[in-house]
Structures are given as C-alpha cells and as structure tokens.
Amino acid sequence: MKVIFYLFVFAVVVFVNIGGFIPFLKVDEEDIERNIKHLKRQQWFQNYLNDEKYRELIIHNKDVRLVIGKFKNNKLGRVSYQEKCQEKLHKTLLNNIA
C-alpha cells in the first residue's frame, strides 16, 4: 500500500515538473502581438483601443495581455470564437480598471 502511495506521489511530482518545461503552453509577447494584430481588424476591438482607459490596459496590463495571448490565433477568424474572446476580454478589462 505504501508503495502505491509513493508511486502516486512520484507521478504527481513528475507531472507538475514537466508542466514547467513545456514552453509552447506559455504565452509570450509574440503570441500577444500576433493576436492583437488579428484583433485590430475587428470593430469591437477598435472600440476598446479608441477608449483611453481600455487602451492603456491592453498595452500595459499583464493580466489583459495574458488573456489576449491565450486566444487561439487559428480560431480568431470565426465569428463565434470572436464573440467568446470579446466577452472574456471585456470581463478581464472590467476586472482590471483601477
């Protein structure tokens, strides 16, 4: 019984450590900039950029930029996915207004 417990603990430790070494799961500035470039084509995103308080958050706020970077670039052309992204971004912007 102890052996199974120790194997389980070992497996959890290995799994957690492997997660830290998978760089393609982490968002970087390249992902954020690529998604912003794509989003700039959308009127709803342009509306955020034209509003000074939201623009500052999009440019400088770590949480907002992380959310933008997590959007799946290959799905940003779909209207239904854009609506989900718009809703998620809106919630994040509202949560980060000072």
Image (cartoon, rainbow, N blue to C red):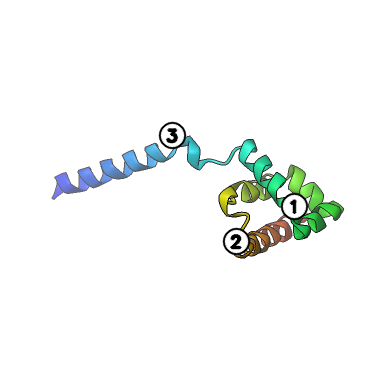
In the picture of the structure, the residue carrying the numbered disc 1 is 41
Three-letter amino acid code at the position of disc 3: Phe
Point out which mark residue 21 bears: 3
User: Where is residue 81 drawn, in percent x and y?
Assistant: 60, 61
**Residue 82: quadrant of the picture:** bottom right
Residues at marks 1 and 2, CA–CA distance in whole angstroms: 15 Å
The kind of secondary structure element at disc 3 is: loop
In the picture of the structure, the residue carrying the numbered disc 2 is 81
The kind of secondary structure element at disc 2 is: helix
Three-letter amino acid code at the position of disc 1: Arg
Q: Compared to 68, does 95 lie above or below?
A: below
User: Where is residue 3 drawn, in percent x and y?
Assistant: 15, 44
View extreme (front): residue: 77
Q: Are marks 3 and 2 in contact (CB under 8 Å)?
A: no
Binning the other alpha carbons within 10 Å of mark 2 as few (below 14), some (14 to 19) or many (20 upward) gives some
Three-letter amino acid code at the position of disc 2: Tyr
Q: Is residue 13 left or right of residue 61?
A: left
